[in-house]
Amino acid sequence: MALNDKTAVVTGAVMGIGRAITEILLRNGAKVALLDVNETAGKDLMEVLEKQYGRERTLFLNCNVESEEQIKAAFKKVADAFGGIDILCNNAGILNESMWEKTVSINLMGVIRGTYLALEHMSKLSGGRGGVIVNTASMAGVGPLPSCPVYTATKHGVVGFTRAMAVTRAASTASGYGIRFNALCPGFVQTDLLSTIPAKLGKFCHLADMTNQLVEKIGTLTVSDVAECFLELVTDETKNGEALLFFPQGKQYVTFPSLI
Ligand SMILES: NC(=O)C1=CN([C@@H]2O[C@H](COP(=O)(O)OP(=O)(O)OC[C@H]3O[C@@H](n4cnc5c(N)ncnc54)[C@H](O)[C@@H]3O)[C@@H](O)[C@H]2O)C=CC1
Ligand SMILES: CCCCCC(=O)CC\C=C/C=C/C=C/[C@@H](O)[C@@H](O)CCCC(=O)O
């Protein structure tokens, strides 16, 4: 998929991984709608992006992925402004084992909500152009992190949901959305989310040292590393139903057991 003049929506777009994904999309010619709850950082980033890429290719919308109403309104504004949606990155996420319901609401329910609402704009069955949806899961979506079981559950859920949507797409022409679905599964990445971990482990804070040792053992990625892997899942049209696992030592497409 060439990105020139394609329209992308990125949630959690103004910081960390989402910002890097936004910038790599813009560098490759896409128009990008940035959805985030951090309005201050969003407006500051927009000043930078508009100078670099022009006002006509960027749009910031204050949007909480926990709200069906806000996502629905945001997607309509994007479609009205840019003429449709071709790419969605459900990236917004938090880690907070003390606020585990909120973690589920954002990390898993937000991905499901964004995906279902995007179908209304992207699916060829409803007049859309098709496209690709990339969900930011995590290495913790493939292997459990003992210090954050709920976060791990949300990321396993994102991987499972993404793969199921991909199979739905492939399994029946009735759901011929014309959309590919892939999961991004990075290891530890140098962002605010990672740097605030010790305070976010809740009842598992006694496992903070073990987690830090794991970070030391595996090492950390930059947000640019993640954005490059995201681009691969978007542009390689053979990729559907994939979970791309990557960490400083390398990357691999996860092979899941075939059950039948
Ligand atoms: N940092 C890491 O080590 C890794 C992070 N991830 C995942 O990558 C994604 C991005 O994480 P980071 O960039 O590290 O975090 P970050 O904390 O640097 O950025 C997250 C962004 O999402 C936004 N956000 C939070 N809740 C939101 C909501 N309800 N609605 C809309 N926007 C919201 C924040 O305002 C922020 O701009 C998350 O899904 C995270 O689970 C995956 C693997 C590794
Ligand atoms: C707690 C920080 C989470 C930061 C956000 C992320 O999503 C980062 C996920 C990065 C790595 C996850 C690694 C999971 C490893 C498990 O498969 C398991 O190997 C860990 C077992 C503990 C150990 O080996 O010491």
Image: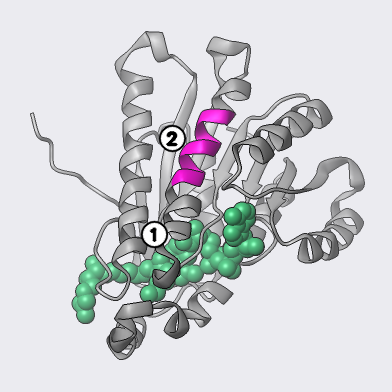
Q: Nearer the viewer, residue 213 or 27?
A: 213
Q: How far apart are marks 2 and 1 (CA)?
A: 15 Å
**Res 164 → quadrant:** top left
- Answer above or below: position of 143 versus 123: below
Q: Mark 1 points at which residue?
A: 138
**Res 201 → quadrant:** bottom left
Task: Give the amino acid at mark 1.
Answer: Ser
The range drawn in magenta is 109-117
- Can residue 114 be found in the magenta stretch? yes
Residue 171, numbered circle:
none
- Answer above or below: position of 121 versus 132: above
Label 1: element kind = loop
Label 1 beta carbon within 8 A of ligand 2: yes
- Residue 222, given in percent of the width and then of the height, sits at 53, 72
Q: Which of 50 and 90 is in front in this view?
A: 90
Mark positioned earlier in the residue sequence (2 or 1)? 1
- Crowding at dot 1, Cα within 10 Å, few <14 / some 14-19 / many 20+, comes out as many
Total label count? 2
Rendering quadrant holding ligand 2: bottom left
**Left or right of 206 in this view: 26:** right
Q: Name the residue under label 2.
A: 181
Kindly identify the residue that appears in the image at 59 percent across and 21 percent down.
120
